[in-house]
Image (spheres, helix red, strand yellow):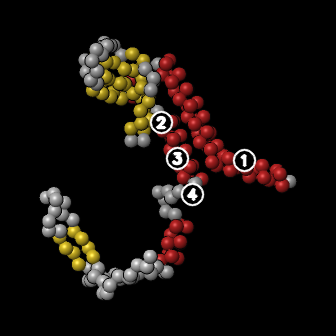
Amino acid sequence: MKKLAAILLLAIFAFNTVGYRLFFNMLESTTDAAFTAQLDHGNYDSKDLVEVKVPINMPYQVATPAFERVDGEINVNGQVYKYVMRKVQADTMTLLCLPHYEKTALQNKATEFAGKVNDLPTNDTNKKAEAFKMLTADFDITENLSLAGLQTSQAVSNLYRNAGLSRTFIPENGQPPEVFC
């Protein structure tokens, strides 16, 4: 019974450390493969395509007069876009992209799950943190620090014109201790 409990706890620990990331990576790759297959078969609406023009400065660039099918993705402001087609003309590369909503949702869920597993604060109010904050606020010690005894002086002779650094010191009463060797 103890061995079974130890194995169960070890499995839960392994899932919490790396297992959930592997699980979400597997889901993302499956979703990517299905989405790419849809793009290869032309199962998309051309109204949903987003055009991105990128300036390129490469000598001897081969121009493509028509769009060609390419694979790839870009993440803009948390939204994943998959490349559908590309065309290169003179000094501009035109990319036609489709938003990949499923992968974006999976990445958001993975981030949310990782935050919950690792007990990271989320956007919603955390009641435990507020209770802890109210408990510790009663025992905060506030000390007033007086800086009236500090004096500042400006260096008069400088090697460089802009090298003037202010020096702050506290005057001491008495001699420093003698060193015995």
Q: Select label 4 or label 2 by which is in front.
A: 4
Which disc number belongs to residue 119?
A: 4
Q: Is residue 66 left or right of residue 113?
A: left
Neighbor class of circle 2 (other Cα within 10 Å; few <14, some 14-19, many 20+) is few
Type of the residue with mark 2 = Tyr
Label pair 4/1, CB-CB below 8 angstroms: no
Q: CA distance from mark 4 to mark 3?
A: 12 Å
Secondary structure state at the residue bearing disc 1: helix
* Marks 4 & 3, CB-CB < 8 Å contact: no
Up/down of 116 relative to 49, above or below: below
Looking at marks 4 and 3 on the same chain, the residue that comes earlier in the sequence is marked by: 3
As shown in the figure, which amino acid type bears the numbered disc 3? Thr
Image quadrant holding the C terminus, namely bottom left
Q: Earlier in the sequence, mark 4 or mark 1?
A: 1
Is tag 1's residue or tag 3's residue first in the polypeptide sequence? Answer: 1
Question: Which amino acid type is shown beneath numbered disc 1?
Answer: Ala
Q: Quadrant of residue 81?
A: top left
Sequence-wise first label, 3 or 2: 2
Q: On the image, numbered disc 2 is attached to which residue?
A: 101
Residue found at x 48% / y 22%: 39
**Where in the figure is residue 108, as x and y percent of width and height?**
50, 44
Residue under label 3, please give it.
111
State the residue position of label 1.
11
Figure label count: 4
Among all residues in the image, which is located at the extreme bottom?
Answer: 174
Q: 142 or 84: which is nearer to us?
A: 142
Residue 43 appears in the rendering: no
How far apart marks 3 and 2 lie (CA) works out to 15 Å
Which residue is pictured at 14% across the width and 68% down the height? Answer: 156
Of mark 2 and mark 1, the one earlier in the sequence is: 1
